[in-house]
Image (cartoon, grey):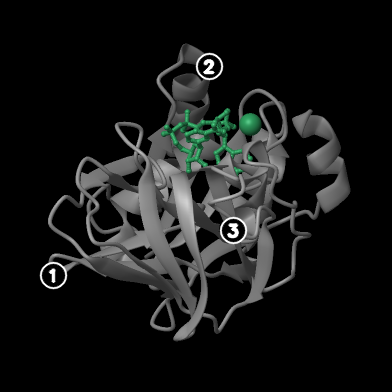
């Protein structure tokens, strides 16, 4: 029997919808199991969805996710808060497609971190100097606050705030963007986001990352003693998301701003 878990945002509306999903699925003999689910229902926003993926990262790719958005439309969710019945009907019919999305991966201090949106290095304490290599080829020496590598899904998140291009759904690409680069006669770097093929390994190296942090979606880690790390698309696992109805990507994009 299919096991399900429910992750909701903290607000009352999301919790109530989560309770309703739970009651209906229990009445259809599905098993409620927060520790080892086959399907994770996510009720909230894109942020809630990302946190749910991180909570069940170890179970990927065996676990699948299904989201319902409370608030505006979301990039990870195709159902709105007034469409709970529709979502349940689709799920219970077991007639749905599953879309797979890539994860970024990096290894630091023997720990492996996966990201849905982006992996970034940020130093707000001092000017960060770092070298950028793309698949072992030197690109530039960068000075500024940091660098951000995002997925297609993450292109509308932090990347967009950095002036990065939004990448259309379905394109298997990654993007590298500068975070507050310094550009003058003695310091030059590309000064534009660069869209890269999914096979590209981005290596960031520095004499010192002291006081810099490694940002992995919602989580941050110190990297004071690290000299270099690589960011690439994980070839071991992809996130599986249930797609019931399809909402156009541009409609979602339009509702974002
Ligand atoms: P959070 O509150 O979970 O998310 C921050 C905001 O980003 C929320 O409004 C969330 O939408 C939205 N968001 C998340 N992923 C998105 C995506 N792929 N496309 C469009 N919007 C998206 O904050 P958090 O836990 O600190 O970090 C989660 C994410 O926030 C990070 O991965 C990063 O991309 C983003 N972030 C952005 C900035 C920035 O733009 N300056 C700075 C730090 C972090 P919902 O309201 O639907 O949840
Ligand atoms: Mn949203």
Taking the spot 87% from the left edge, 42% from the top edge, the residue there is 251
Residue 72 in the image: x percent, y percent? 71, 27
Decide: few, some or many residues near mark 3? Use Cα within 10 Å; few <14, some 14-19, many ≥20.
some
Taking the spot 31% from the left edge, 56% from the top edge, the residue there is 56
The answer to which quarter of the image holds residue 125 is top left
Taking the spot 34% from the left edge, 40% from the top edge, the residue there is 123
In the visual, does 221 lie left or right of 62? left
Decide: few, some or many residues near mark 2? Use Cα within 10 Å; few <14, some 14-19, many ≥20.
some
Decide: few, some or many residues near mark 1? Use Cα within 10 Å; few <14, some 14-19, many ≥20.
few
**Alpha carbon distance from label 3 to label 1:** 30 Å
Taking the spot 34% from the left edge, 51% from the top edge, the residue there is 54
Q: Earlier in the sequence, mark 3 or mark 1?
A: 1
Query: Quick one: quadrant of the C terminus?
Result: top right
Q: Residue 110 got which mark?
A: 1
The answer to which quarter of the image holds residue 62 is bottom left
- What residue occupies the far front of the structure in this picture? 185
Compared with 150, 112 (above or below) is below
Closer to us: 187 or 248 = 187
Residue 101 in the image: x percent, y percent? 57, 67
In the visual, does 173 lie left or right of 17? right
Residue 159 in the image: x percent, y percent? 61, 46
Q: Earlier in the sequence, mark 1 or mark 2?
A: 2
Mark 3 vs mark 1, foreground winner is 3
Compared with 174, 51 (above or below) is above
Numbered disc 1: secondary structure? loop
Residue designated by label 2: 13
**Alpha carbon distance from label 1 to label 2:** 40 Å
Residue designated by label 3: 189
Q: Is residue 31 visible?
A: no
């Amino acid at each position: 029997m299919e096991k399900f878990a429910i992750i909701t945002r903290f607000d009352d509306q999301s919790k109530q919808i989560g309770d309703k999903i739970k009651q209906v699925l229990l009445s259809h003999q599905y098993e409620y199991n927060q520790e080892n689910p086959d399907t994770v229902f996510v009720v909230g926003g894109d942020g809630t969805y990302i946190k749910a993926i991180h909570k069940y990262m170890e179970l990927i790719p065996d676990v699948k996710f299904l989201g319902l958005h409370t608030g505006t439309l979301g990039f990870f969710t195709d159902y709105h808060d007034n469409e709970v019945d529709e979502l349940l009907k689709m799920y219970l019919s077991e007639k749905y497609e599953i879309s797979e999305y890539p994860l970024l991966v990096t290894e630091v201090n023997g720990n492996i971190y996966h990201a849905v949106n982006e992996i970034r290095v940020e130093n707000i304490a001092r000017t960060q100097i770092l070298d950028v290599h793309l698949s072992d080829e030197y690109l530039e020496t960068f000075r500024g606050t940091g660098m951000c590598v995002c997925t297609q899904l993450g292109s509308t998140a932090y990347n967009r705030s950095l002036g990065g291009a939004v990448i259309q759904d379905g394109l298997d690409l990654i993007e590298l963007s500068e975070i507050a680069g310094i550009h003058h006669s003695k310091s030059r770097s590309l000064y534009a986001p660069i869209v890269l093929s999914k096979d590209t390994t981005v290596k960031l190296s520095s004499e010192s990352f002291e006081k810099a942090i490694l940002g992995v979606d919602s989580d941050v880690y110190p990297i004071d003693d690290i000299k270099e790390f690589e960011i690439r698309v994980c070839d071991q696992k992809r996130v599986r998301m249930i797609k019931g109805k399809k909402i156009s990507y541009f409609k979602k994009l339009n509702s974002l701003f």
